[in-house]
Amino acid sequence: MTRTITDKLVATVIEVTDLGQLFPASVLKGRLGLDVRIERGSLSTGKKVRLHGLGLEEEVEIIGIEMLSNPHDPNVVRILCSKPKTLALPTGKVEGWVIAEQ
Amino acid sequence: MSGGYRGTGLTQAEVEAMTADFRAAGGVVDQSVDAQRYLQARGAGGLTLNRETILLPANPTRTAVFEELVHAERFRRGVTIEAGRGGVLQFEAEAAETLIRNRHAWQLPAEEVRQVIENLRNIRAELQRLGAGQ
């Protein structure tokens, strides 16, 4: 099947949590939690995506998807990613950040 | 996910016995203090992140442990979440249905099964409200 551009994941990042910093003595070490709303395409573990915002970008891997529904908005999903090596990402509620599959 | 079923907490030995096959296959069950802090922060009685990672509290209920094992198995078969489909709700519904279907084989306490049934009703109502279908 030919894959079109619209199949590719694009998701808006709503909130960033540095899980590795907050919970270092657990499997969350070195992980970043991103609360995202999928705009296009689909989300799955193992997928490598570009995290970009404010003119910066870096590749991260989706390592986990929390099987926990967001009570305020079920369409917002928390994913766990590898922590970007060079990107300095703000934490808390954010605007202007997106993950996109290339 | 399990929002934390009210019920009898399992001993460590019971948790280890129930998760033995999962761990033998390479799975990790994290019950560390930090994992438990994270569960509290998320309001969860257990949490599955992928096919090989489960977070559990110190004394989870029998139903919570089976729910996370069901989620991990679902990840093994592939989890794909699409836009506007209610996020992970569909997978929570599937897990609840699996728990109910296997309640006798897995010896789930009746009180915990009642909570699963109630959760499933709520999930289905939310999916319907979202127009996400089943």
Image (tube, coloured by chain):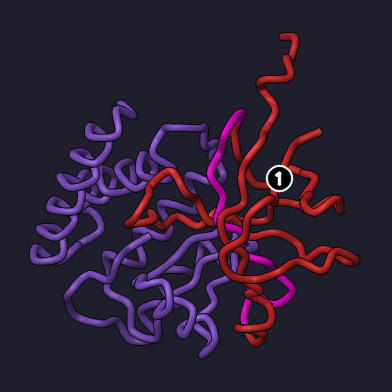
Chain colours: A red, B purple
Magenta residues span A26-41
Q: Is residue B50 above or below residue B55?
A: above
Residue B119, how many percent across, how many down? 19, 53
Q: Is residue B52 left or right of residue B66?
A: right
Residue at 37% over, 49% down: A73
Q: Quadrant of the N terminus of chain A?
A: top right
Q: Amino acid at mark 1?
A: Ile
Element under disc 1: strand
| Residue A92 image offset from top left, x and y in percent | 58, 70
Note whether B6 is above or below A3 in the view shown.
below
Residue B32 in the image, given as x and y percentages of width and height: 53, 86
Residue of label 1: A99
Overall secondary structure of the magenta stretch? strand
Left or right for A62, reference B63: right
The quadrant holding residue B68 is bottom left
Q: Position of residue B14 (x, y in %)?
A: 35, 79
Residue A32 is one of the magenta-drawn residues: yes
Residue at position x 14%, y 51% from top?
B117
Q: Quadrant of the C terminus of chain A?
A: top right
Residue B55 versus residue A94 in the image, above or below: below
- At 17% from the left edge and 74% from the top edge, which residue is drawn? B6
